[in-house]
Structures are given as C-alpha cells and as structure tokens.
Image (tube, rainbow, N blue to C red):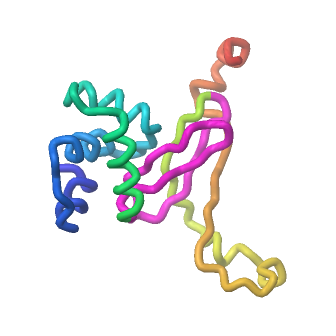
Amino acid sequence: MSDLLERLRGRGWRMTSQRRVVAEVLGGDHVHLTADEVHARAVLRLPEISRATVYNTLGEMVSLGEVVEVSTEGRAKLYDPNAHHPHQHLVCSGCGTIRDVHPTGDPLADLPAEQRFGFTVSEAEVTYRGLCPSCTEPGDAAERP
C-alpha cells in the first residue's frame, strides 16, 4: 500500500474506489502529475472515473494537507504526494521534469536578518532549475520548441 493511501486511511477518509485509484496513481517517488495526467492514469484502472471526480479528489487531498500543489512557470499545477517529507524541487527548464531534492543547508538560516524586513519567517520554498540529462544531449536542443 502506498504511503499516501496509508495516511488517508489513517485519517479516516472514506475510501471509495475512485478515491483509492487517485491515491494509487499518486503513489511512488518523485511523483508530480497534472490533474489531467492523474485522470489519464486513473482511467486505465477505473474506466468510469470522471475528470470532475479526479479534480475534486485532488482538491480534497490538498485541503487535507496530504498532497501539495506545485506550480512551475507556464505549466499546469502538479500534485505532489510527498507532503510530509520536507523537500525542494529540481525542475528541468526544457521538458518540465521535476525531481524531489533534499539540500543539506537550511534555507531559513540562509536569509540574512537584514533581508527579513522584520518578518518572522516560518518557511521557505526553493526551486532549483536547469536542464536534465535528456535535454542536454546533443541534438535535443534543436528539436525543442
């Protein structure tokens, strides 16, 4: 059983077949899917699942704090089930691939006091950007739009 399914069951969330399938689709490491990608994969497991059900289920999971919405420039929101393990994201500027990363530094400590402007800083989001190995291979750059 996936970590997400276990967490949802532990919260007493009513587990319908549709909700179970959406949670199963989001199982695994480095999962960052759009709602449409979740729907496409869910349909393979449960053909009658509607797009609206997937969107509503994802919204409920986000509201519960069990899934995080990730926004990247110019792309649809992605859903990340790794909500309870602090991490940052490494995003490919070419194809949009996202990987979870765990830097060793503390981004809160890296912000100097004079740059806090009196804020009590409680969290930081850091996104690393670059090109993945597939997008840096010779010949690929000319083929990208």
- Name the residue at 65% across, 16% down: 140
**Where does residue 69 sit, x and y in percent of width and height?**
49, 52
- Name the residue at 41% across, 32% down: 37
Magenta-drawn stretch contains 74? yes
Is the residue 132 above or below the residue 26 in the image?
Answer: above
**Where does residue 103 sit, x and y in percent of width and height?**
56, 61
Is the residue 75 above or below the residue 57 in the image?
Answer: above
The stretch of residues the image draws in magenta is: 65-94
**Where does residue 48 sit, x and y in percent of width and height?**
22, 28
- Name the residue at 39% across, 43% down: 55
**Where does residue 60 sit, x and y in percent of width and height?**
35, 56
- Residue closer to the observer: 59 or 118: 59
Picture quadrant of residue 65: bottom left
Determine whether, in the image, residue 84 is placed left or right of residue 7. Answer: right
Q: Quadrant of the C terminus?
A: top right
- Name the residue at 57% across, 25% down: 134
Is the residue 130 above or below the residue 144 in the image?
Answer: below
Main secondary structure along the magenta-highlighted residues: loop
Picture quadrant of residue 83: bottom left
Residue at the right extreme of this rendering: 114
- Residue closer to the observer: 35 or 28: 35
- Residue closer to the observer: 49 or 81: 49
Magenta-drawn stretch contains 144? no
Determine whether, in the image, residue 71 is placed left or right of residue 18. Answer: right
Number of labels in the image equals 0
